[in-house]
Image (tube, rainbow, N blue to C red):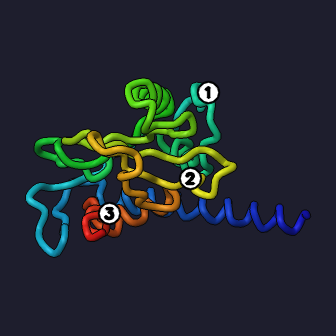
Amino acid sequence: MSLKLNRLNQIIENDVSELRQIVSLLKEQWGQPREAIHRGGKCPFLLGCSFSPEPANSLEPLSIDVPTDVQEFWQQTRSAALFRDAQWGQWGIEVLEPTEAHAETWRHTQARPHDFTSFDLVLARFFGDSDLLVIACDPRRADFGSVTIALPLDKRDDWPVVAKSFRDFLEQLLEAQGDKYWELHFHKK
């Protein structure tokens, strides 16, 4: 049993270390707005990433099991604006601090109870549209930690699952230079 526990701890430590590296790359490469390449062409606006300089105070308002990578993100930075359009602010992702994530989750669970569950965490909002980044927080399910994009007009069954974890989502978003990489795959189905 201790071998399994040790292996699990190693996996968690590797994920945390990888998440730190991804956040560092986002800060280094995108700390100043710059040109991005989306779908083979130049993005029409400069994109940049900014991070709160302090960590989240607490995860207290959250009454669900938040995946380790999300907790680690909040321990590094309370909130972030990822690949935000520097001129108009109409592109990118706003990663919410725990209190805001809790409030946003509650608001959407109340407004759309058939689509949002008590094990969802609305972790981020998209600038310029009404899409939401939702983390699966039921540790009893195989999809624990996965990232889904909640679409404002579509039912949950039509929401794309875009990554197996928040760390994986950040890695793919960094590789796509802030483009909504999932739209290419989702619309091909």
The residue at 45%/30% (across/down) is 113
Determine which of the numbered discs, if any, sits on residue 108 in the image.
Answer: none
Query: Do the residues under discs 2 and 3 have CB atoms within 8 angstroms?
Result: no
Q: Quadrant of the C terminus?
A: bottom left
- Where residue 123 sits, quadrant-wise, is top left
Any part of residue 131 in sight: yes
The residue at 60%/62% (across/down) is 15
Q: Which residue is mark 2?
A: 145
Between disc 1 and disc 3, the foreground one is 3
Q: Is residue 48 left or right of residue 138?
A: left
- Residue 66 lies, in percent from the top left, at 60, 42
Q: How many marks?
A: 3
Any part of residue 24 in sight: no
Q: Which residue is mark 3?
A: 182
The residue at 31%/46% (across/down) is 93
Question: Which class describes the residues within 10 Å of circle 1: few (<14), some (14-19), or many (20+)?
Answer: few
Q: Which residue is mark 1?
A: 60
